[in-house]
């Protein structure tokens, strides 16, 4: 299947993308991974993207699109892929449509992970990261440490990242509503959007998503 995954920050896209890609046996194509890979490998696209980032500027859509195109043309993506973080706006969605049309392939579904705004704020603003190892992540409500402010794993100090503060999260949500959310209407007009709730245990959400995608696939046969 060829799927685009959308949803606000804090909806669990990263977690679900990895799980769904594994279940569907397709590559998980994340824009963050694309940028990191191209920059670390010093590809021409990576050098170009880094030149914008070093100046504190946004990387132009055409660079992001070119990276996505290159990745989707790799052998492991021939039979499908799951796009996470791309397209990020309507112009990127239009460019993706043109790219797929040129290859005579189409999207199967756009999976929209729905979560209330207050829950997004609660999820992100409650995160606490270990200063010694950023892979040690806790949550003041959902997975609190045994001792407040102290990492269970190594005893390091737990802190809240600047971009996890409530004010920053609400700003990120506003950017999502303004720039990315319009692609949902864009894809709804094509009959591709499958919306599921992103509330509940991770396993439940994965199963909910798989069932919704299979229904969509069966209906469009």
Image: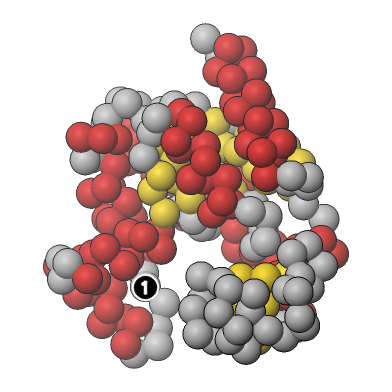
Q: How is the image coloured?
A: secondary structure
In the image, residue 155 sits, relative to residue 92, either above or below, namely below
Where on the picture, by quarter, is residue 156?
bottom right
Residue 99 rendering spot, x and y as whole percentages? 32, 41
- In the rendered view, does 217 fall on the left or right side of 147? left
Q: Residue at x 63, y 53 (%)?
A: 12
In the image, residue 161 sits, relative to residue 114, either above or below, namely below
Q: Residue at x 61, y 70 (%)?
A: 137
- Asked whether 13 or 137 is in front, the reply is 137
Where on the picture, by quarter, is residue 160?
bottom right
- Asked whether 71 or 99 is in front, the reply is 71
Q: Please indicate, yes or no, whether residue 62 appears anywhere in the rendered image.
A: no
Would you name the residue on which mark 1 appears?
59
- Asked whether 132 or 9 is in front, the reply is 132
- In the rendered view, does 79 fall on the left or right side of 218? left
Q: Which quadrant does the N terminus fall into?
A: top left
Residue 19 rendering spot, x and y as whole percentages? 52, 41
Q: Please indicate, yes or no, whether residue 112 appears anywhere in the rendered image.
A: yes
In the image, residue 94 sits, relative to residue 108, either above or below, namely below
Residue 164 rendering spot, x and y as whole percentages? 67, 78
Q: Residue at x 82, y 55 (%)?
A: 116
**Secondary element at image label 1:** loop
Where on the picture, by quarter, is residue 184?
top right
Q: Residue at x 32, y 87 (%)?
A: 54
Residue 118 rendering spot, x and y as whole percentages? 85, 64
């Amino acid at each position: 299947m060829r799927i685009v995954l959308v949803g606000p920050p804090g909806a669990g896209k990263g977690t679900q993308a990895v799980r769904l890609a594994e279940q569907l046996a397709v590559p998980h194509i994340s824009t963050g991974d694309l940028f990191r890979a191209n920059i670390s490998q010093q590809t021409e696209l990576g050098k170009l993207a880094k030149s914008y980032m070093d100046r504190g500027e946004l990387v132009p859509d055409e660079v992001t699109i070119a990276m996505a195109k290159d990745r989707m043309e790799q052998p492991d993506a021939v039979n499908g892929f799951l796009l996470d973080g791309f397209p990020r706006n309507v112009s990127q969605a239009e460019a993706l449509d043109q790219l797929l049309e040129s290859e005579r392939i189409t999207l199967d579904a756009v999976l929209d992970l729905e979560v209330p705004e207050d829950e997004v704020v609660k999820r992100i603003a409650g995160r606490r990261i270990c200063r010694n190892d950023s892979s040690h992540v806790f949550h003041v409500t959902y997975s609190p440490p045994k001792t407040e402010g102290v990492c269970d794993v190594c005893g390091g100090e737990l802190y809240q990242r600047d971009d996890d503060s409530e004010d920053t999260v609400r700003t990120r949500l506003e950017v999502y509503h303004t720039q990315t959310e319009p692609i949902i209407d864009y894809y709804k007009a094509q009959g591709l959007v499958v919306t599921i709730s992103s509330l509940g245990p991770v396993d439940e959400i994965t199963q909910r998503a798989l069932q919704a995608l299979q229904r969509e696939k069966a209906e469009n046969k």
